[in-house]
Image (cartoon, rainbow, N blue to C red):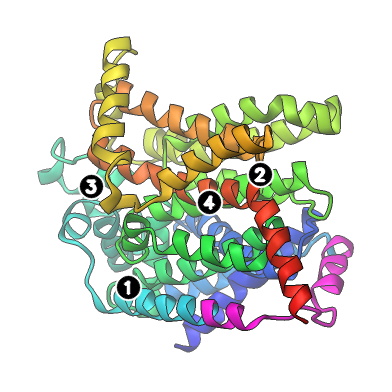
Amino acid sequence: MIIFVLVTLLQWVMGFGALGTMRTVMPRSMSVPLALIIGMFLHTAIFFCVDFFNLGMSQLMMTMTAILGVALTHVWWPRVRTFYDDLFKKPTFSLQLYDVVVLGVGLTIGYYVVWAAWYWPVTPFDAMAGIDLVARETVEEGTIVNRVFTEPALAGRLSNQPFYAPFAMLMQVMYRLIGFTYGQVWLGVMAIAFSWFLWAAYRRVCQPFIANILWLMTILTPELLGYTYLLQTDYANAVFIASGVIMMALTLERDDVSALGASAILLAAGCWSRTETILLVGLGLLAVAPLLFKRYGTRPTLSFLGIAGGASFLMFAVWNLFFLQVYLPVRPDTLQELTGFDVARFISVIGDTFNNVILDKGLWAASFLIFAVIIVADLVVKRSMSSKATLLWIVMIWFGLEVVGTIFTAAVVEQTLRRGIFKLIPLMFFYVAASPLIGQWGRAIQQWQMGRK
């Protein structure tokens, strides 16, 4: 337990240092959980480098790389000190009774999520074929290049699961080194941090009572909730991408948040957690580029697009182009699953996605229905739309997933694309929270509250 607390605190401080270095300005209610999410990503990236120096992936090296990460993110101390000055100012928030009730429900869900991740073993699929298999052997042999990849009897028999993007696998390695039997407790930790961030983010754009309701709807979305304790790459990927998009939207469309640097880090983390994310990030950045040019001008926009796109491609390339193609003794057969773009298949994939995934209320409850109703209501009643940046990202992520389902034979609609939709759920509810119509309802509630005082 001591090593767990120590490593978590180091990751947290690492994230604070990164936010400070990027001159991030945001409320503490958002920066505190976001720092842990960013710190987890940065720690896995630094810990990954241990393999190249043959130092052995051990508990000692895990701790040392966390300390190194803290040191690196605090090199530009004047910037970081300014961030800490704001972080440790006297708290000014106040909670209503309904906030306390909702947070009590959220904490109860968080307890069960962590308990489930600690108690239930890794699913047989991951235990035998993918993320956890590589992680277990890495812990045993001290290197990612272990017998999963080097055993002669397995040559030519591996599926693509052991070659998945490394974030989830490296988190499994670290939490197994900490001492957790099944490793996947990190999912619960990330889920709590992300839920905390969403709670604060929704409250930035709408009345707190409505934000609480939308927040509960988000964290209780059945399929999304289920993967907070089931080991896969998709929930973590949704955390990174949704957080990055929300920070971009808040920075672009509101004056009280400045976090494009944090957004770039989170988008890069998304590419570190799932391979096809590089396509989604590219499409999303291209879609919002006109908004960025209009808001910030040419040079700042090109700088941000270069940093965000470059960092994302770097994290994609380190694993997929260097580690898998140069460093590892075996190669995935991903290219054999790549086919040309076919319009008929594309239309078929879209139809299957709607019929078999999106319209399934058992997976998403009323998420898509609420999102569609709010879009139509805003256009009809308010003759305006909510966060344009968020909507563009939602459209581009959905379009990118459909393209992936079209050109990769292994991308099954009911599996790969279904889990890819995780990224859309928090973004859709954030879009709803920022809706002009919801804003009108929020002002009416606020006036009613003031009238009762």
Of the numbered discs in the image, which one, if any, rests on residue 429?
Answer: 4
Which residue does the image show at 83% across and 59% down from the upper left? 76
Residue 96 vertical position relative to residue 340 in the rendered view, above or below: below
Q: Position of residue 400 (x, y in %)?
A: 44, 28
Residue 117: image tag: 1
How far is mark 4 from mark 3, CA to CA?
45 Å
Distance Cα–Cα, label 4 vs label 1: 26 Å
The boundaries of the magenta stretch are 78-102
Label whose residue precedes the other's in the sequence (4 or 3): 3
Q: Residue at x 25, y 25 (%)?
A: 337
Provide residue 333's location: percent of width, then percent of height.
25, 29
Q: Which of the two discs, 4 and 1, sits closer to the camera?
A: 4
Q: CA distance from mark 3 to mark 2?
A: 36 Å
Q: Which residue is mark 2?
A: 264
Residue 132 location (% of width, % of height): 27, 60
- Tell me the SS state at disc 2: helix
Q: CA distance from mark 1 to mark 3?
A: 30 Å
Location of residue 290 (image quadrant): top right
Amino acid at circle 2: Ala
Q: Earlier in the sequence, mark 4 or mark 2?
A: 2
Asked whether the residues under the numbered discs 3 and 2 touch, taking CB atoms below 8 Å apart as contact, a structural biologist would say: no
**Quadrant assignment for the N terminus:** bottom left
Q: Main secondary structure of the magenta part?
A: helix
- Of mark 4 and mark 1, the one earlier in the sequence is 1
Please name the residue that numbered disc 3 is placed on.
150
CA separation in Å, label 2 and label 1: 29 Å
Q: Is 102 in front, or is 389?
A: 102
Frontmost of labels 1 and 3 is 1
